[in-house]
Image (cartoon, rainbow, N blue to C red):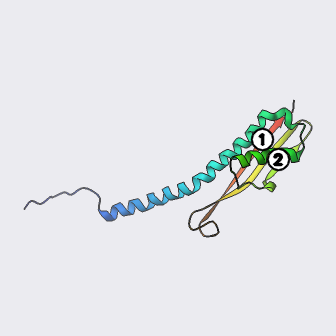
């Protein structure tokens, strides 16, 4: 019989104790990542208004809001409501602001209140009229 004096390595219990927190972190990241990706699309929708600066100065607030809604619908963004879009129009510039809250359900279904994470996003873009 041969005995090993110094054993090295990790036990099964030690491996489980390491994998549980790592798995939980990966799970949370996978649930919250789509909300952040959606927020990047909202920012892109506002930044794309810069390309139509000359057209925007002739449009009303409702027409600008419809332009933004169309961009959001194309990207399948459902977290932004009509009341989340604020448009301030002056003689020299137009400021578009979107302040909204998106929820990610960590545990259970969307109807469940347990395990929801609420994330708040704010985007502002000022278009200077030339």
* Mark 1 or 2, nearer chain start: 2
In the image, taking residue 59 as reference, residue 96 lies left or right, namely left
Where residue 84 sits: x, y (%)?
78, 54
* Quadrant of image for the C terminus: top right
- Residue located beneath label 1 in the image: 125
Check residue 66 in the rendering and tell me which mark sits there, or answer none.
Answer: 2
C-alpha span from label 1 to label 2:
16 Å
Q: In terms of secondary structure, where does tag 2 sit?
A: helix
Residue projecting furthest to the right: 91
Q: Quadrant of residue 120?
A: bottom right
In the image, taking residue 71 as reference, residue 34 lies left or right, namely left
Q: Residue at x 76, y 44 (%)?
A: 124
Instruction: Tell us which disc is closer to us: 1 or 2.
Output: 2
Q: Quadrant of residue 100?
A: bottom right
In the image, taking residue 83 as reference, residue 39 lies left or right, namely left
Q: Residue at x 70, y 41 (%)?
A: 44
* Quadrant of image for the N terminus: bottom left
Residue projecting furthest to the left: 1
Q: How many marks?
A: 2
Where residue 32 sits: x, y (%)?
58, 55
Q: Quadrant of residue 64?
A: top right
**Callout 1–callout 2 Cβ contact below 8 Å:** no
Q: Residue at x 53, y 58 (%)?
A: 28
């Amino acid at each position: 019989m041969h005995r090993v004096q110094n054993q090295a390595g990790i036990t099964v219990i030690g491996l489980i104790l390491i994998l549980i927190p790592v798995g939980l972190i990966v799970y949370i990241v996978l649930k919250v990542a789509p909300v952040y990706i959606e927020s990047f699309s909202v920012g892109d929708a506002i930044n794309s208004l810069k390309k139509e600066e000359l057209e925007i100065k002739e449009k009303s607030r409702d027409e600008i809001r419809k332009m933004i809604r169309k961009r959001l619908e194309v990207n399948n963004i459902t977290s932004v409501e009509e009341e989340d879009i604020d448009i301030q129009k002056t003689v020299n510039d137009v400021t578009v602001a979107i302040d909204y809250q998106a929820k990610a359900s960590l545990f259970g279904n969307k109807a469940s209140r347990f395990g929801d994470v609420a994330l708040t996003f704010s985007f502002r873009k000022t278009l200077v009229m030339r």
